[in-house]
Amino acid sequence: MKTTENTIPFLATHPGEVLLDEFKARDFTQSDFAKKIGLKKSQLNEIIKRKRNINAELAILLEKALDIDAEYWLEVQKNYDLDKARINNKNQQRLEAIEQWKFIENKIATSFLKKEKIISGDPIEDLITVKKIYNVQNFEELAKLNAEPPYARFRKSTKLETDPINIIGWVKLLHFNASQIFVEKFDYDKKSELIAKLKQILRINKNTIETVQQTLANFGIKLIYQRKGNKTPVDGISFWSNGSPAIGMSLRHNRLDNFAFTLFHELGHVFEHLPNNNKAEFVDLISSKEQKDYKKSKEEKKANLFAQRNMIEPNNWNAFFHNQKFDDKSIIEFAKENEIHPCIVRGRICFTTGTYNTKTSIDYSIY
């Protein structure tokens, strides 16, 4: 059987196997056939058992004895030799791939990538995939990732719930997925128009996840949703991707208020910080899992302030909050006046007061 490198058989077919099939079909014995073509029975048996090859002289004898062209026997022998060489080469590649995988499997988010069906368990294929996802030329670079400035703070956490390798894997997968997306040209001056559209989408709350993503794309911002892995307390990330700002969100909760705040927080980074630094990257962990020095950084404070001010007009919020009427009816009326979903108002109240267990009829679900 003629093969290519992309169709390497599991076993190579030796001409001796074809010869044995002919014996069975024609009811020949090895002893009689060996005498007919002038070979010892042991020599013929070695051919059938793949221990001896067929040369041109023997191919001519087979042609005369079986009425099968000599060229056919030589072609079978040639294909066997090529297939055997390819199989041996592939086996060597697999051995090397297994060895390389042992070197990298504890340096990458193996379980997370497998759960997301990014890697399959075949080391030959997975090594290629890992280089693409992590954007490395060689696997020695993986060992250095934890020490890189954007990720160094993950190592400082003493909380058992945090796995820096899984966080980096989540980040790298988002970077890769973002690189496959193309959006309109980003225009910083359209910020107000975008904010107004997003608030309207959140207020209506219908096909929200998809509509927000498409709206951001129309304004030149990539938005990627990616589930988080184990011990990966991430909410969002913002970064540059092939000349366009990009946002990644983990969608930890099916809550509109969490979704809205994370979205606007990342937009704060997009409009306040990314334009001044095309290499900037902001990974936002769950607030309770983040180091105090990072939570207090000017970038995080500005992103939080951006979210608060652009979701609810500050003067209106201050007047409402100081009025201390936090019942559902007052919240719904204030939300209607400010053209925003009431759960976002109530979420802001809970965050500001630190009270989360009061009863409410307001629906927080994302639709």
Image (spheres, rainbow, N blue to C red):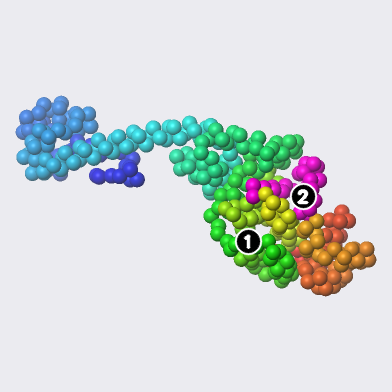
Judge left or right: residue 216 versus residue 56.
right
User: Splitting the image into 4 quarters, where does residue 191 fall?
Assistant: bottom right
Numbered circle sitting on residue 178: none
Q: Residue at x 74, y 48 (%)?
A: 286
SS class, disc 1: loop
**Of pointers 2 and 1, the one earlier in the residue sequence:** 1
In the figure, 70 relative to 350: above or below?
A: above
Q: Residues within 10 Å of mark 1 (few under 14, many from 20)?
A: some
User: Splitting the image into 4 quarters, where does residue 63 fall?
Assistant: top left
Which amino acid type corresponds to the residue marked 1 in the rendered image? Phe
State which quarter of the image contains the C terminus: bottom right
* Residue 17 visible in rendering: no
Q: Which residue is mark 1?
A: 186
Residues shaded magenta:
278-304
Q: Nearer the viewer, residue 47 or 102?
A: 102
Which amino acid type corresponds to the residue marked 2 in the rendered image? Glu
Q: Residues within 10 Å of mark 2 (few under 14, many from 20)?
A: some
User: Splitting the image into 4 quarters, where does residue 43 fall?
Assistant: top left
Q: Which residue is mark 2?
A: 300
* Residue 31 visible in rendering: yes
In the figure, 82 relative to 358: above or below?
A: above
